Amino acid sequence: MATLIMILERKYQALLQEAQRRQLADVEGIHLCFQTLSLASNIDSDCARLLAPHGLSEGRFVILFLLDTTSEGLAPNELAERAGVTRATVTGLLDGLEREALIERQPADNDRRALRIRLTDKGRQTAKRVFDGHSIWIASLFGNLSTTEREQLSMLLNKVAINLDSTKKGVPQ
């Protein structure tokens, strides 16, 4: 099995070197944070690279996935809420998806002033193809971890999340 040492992004390398120079407490904790941020950035970049050939961003992909879960379509405000974005953001995403003929805006059955967003046949095919491939890629990121290691990683990430939540609330650690 090949060993690859994850390289921190340059900005984190510089900050870590400065933390070491200043002899800050828990430089190892700082390193872990920067390692996590670098990993997340790399995952984000790879995600964008894999979605780009399909003309999709992560936001567009999420909208397609959400629409693929319902045959009745969704109102734009429902899409925004489920995707965790603003209505303005969802409008921009929908405009792009409509230009690509992946979605269509239709009047709602009960209120012609309201809209329902539905996938076109092309959108449904794209959603399935991209979702299947994307799911395999995501799963492969953790493919070399045993069940025990995955449980440990999940537990450790939850512990860090609790620390983050506590600091947001001003609770000292």
Image: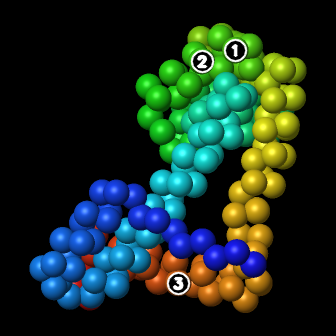
Amino acid type, callout 3: Leu
Residue at the image position 60 percent from the left and 79 percent from the top? 154
- Identify the element where label 3 is drawn: helix
Is 38 placed left or right of 165 in the picture?
A: right
Verify CB contact (< 8 Å) between mark 1 and mark 3: no
Q: CA distance from mark 2 to mark 3?
A: 39 Å
Verify CB contact (< 8 Å) between mark 1 and mark 2: yes
Residue at the image position 72 percent from the left and 28 percent from the top? 54
Instruction: List the single residue furthest toward the left.
Output: 22
> Percent position (x, y) of residue 63?
65, 34
The foreground one among 138 and 49 is 49
- Identify the element where label 1 is drawn: loop
Characterize the local packing of mark 1: few (<14), some (14-19) or many (20 or more) Cα atoms within 10 angstroms: few
Is the residue 132 above or below the residue 57 in the image?
A: below
Residue that numbered label 3 is attached to: 156
Quadrant where the image shows the N terminus: bottom right
> Percent position (x, y) of residue 148?
73, 89
Residue that numbered label 1 is attached to: 100
Residue that numbered label 2 is attached to: 96
Is the residue 49 above or below the residue 74 in the image?
A: below
Verify CB contact (< 8 Å) between mark 2 and mark 3: no
Q: Earlier in the sequence, mark 2 or mark 3?
A: 2
